[in-house]
Amino acid sequence: LTDGAFYGASTLKRNQESISVLKDLGIPDEQILFLNHSNPIHDTELIKNLDLSYKSILESIGDKKIKEIYCTAYEGGHPDHDATFLLALVLAKKYSIEKINQFFTYNSKGLGFVFFRVMSPVNDKYPVAKYKLTFSQLIKHFLLIRKYKSQLKTWIGLSPFVFIKYILYRSQLIQKIPSDFLPQRPHSGRLYYEKRNWFQFEEFQILKDQFLEKNMDKKNEH
């Protein structure tokens, strides 16, 4: 959805790394789509370009039928992750999908300074399912990290904690969120992306509300 060009990494390099990982997971070329080629959106700025992204997604889907959606969790870790969740919500509404599947990356709920936790839900209202991994799957998935060489700095910080969570859970955690969910502040206290000065939630909220009001019926708040 974005050019991914953070910390000086090129868009082409980031995309090539993702393609390599997806191929290892058995995803063929024709099922991999990057929307940032014709309409590049800079890293951390997806929330400013939701209308453009939504239009591009719909054009790419065409007349295909969408039955299930997986997306990054709405957790206050990275603004692009949270913005992706918003796109998933409106897509679920359009295609009459009752629930979307969110997976967790990182957030700083209950933590000070710029500390973070990985693969941990911030919303305890909805149950979290554990999809069991065999030990070989666990190791294979974890070792895919090595292919993201352009994100070495990020993974140096994340990978030890990801490994610990994999060992503890032996699972991929997925939380099903109803498609009528209207997101407010992900959690109390400063969000991780606010601590890193990537974005402020006040601005994020204005853009979020504008996008959702265009595309969703405002019935319930969570």
Image (tube, rainbow, N blue to C red):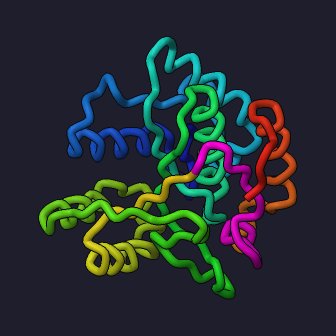
In the depicted view, which residue is nearer to us: 10 or 216? Answer: 216
**Residue in the image at 55% along x and 63% along y:** 126
Residue 108 image offset from top left, x and y in percent = 62, 77
- Looking at the image, which residue sits at the far top? 63
**Residue in the image at 27% along x and 65% along y:** 142
Magenta region, main secondary structure: loop
- Looking at the image, which residue sits at the far left? 136
Residue 193 image offset from top left, x and y in percent = 69, 66
**Residue in the image at 21% along x and 39% along y:** 26
Total number of numbered discs in the rendering: 0
Q: Quadrant of residue 88?
A: top right
In the depicted view, which residue is nearer to us: 37 or 160? Answer: 160
Q: Is residue 192 magenta?
A: yes
Is 115 displayed left or right of 10 in the figure? right
Q: Measured along the vertical axis of the image, is residue 125 above or below residue 178?
A: below
- The quadrant the C terminus occupies is bottom right
| Residue range highlighted in magenta | 178-194
**Residue in the image at 47% along x and 31% along y:** 34
Is 188 displayed left or right of 100 in the figure? right
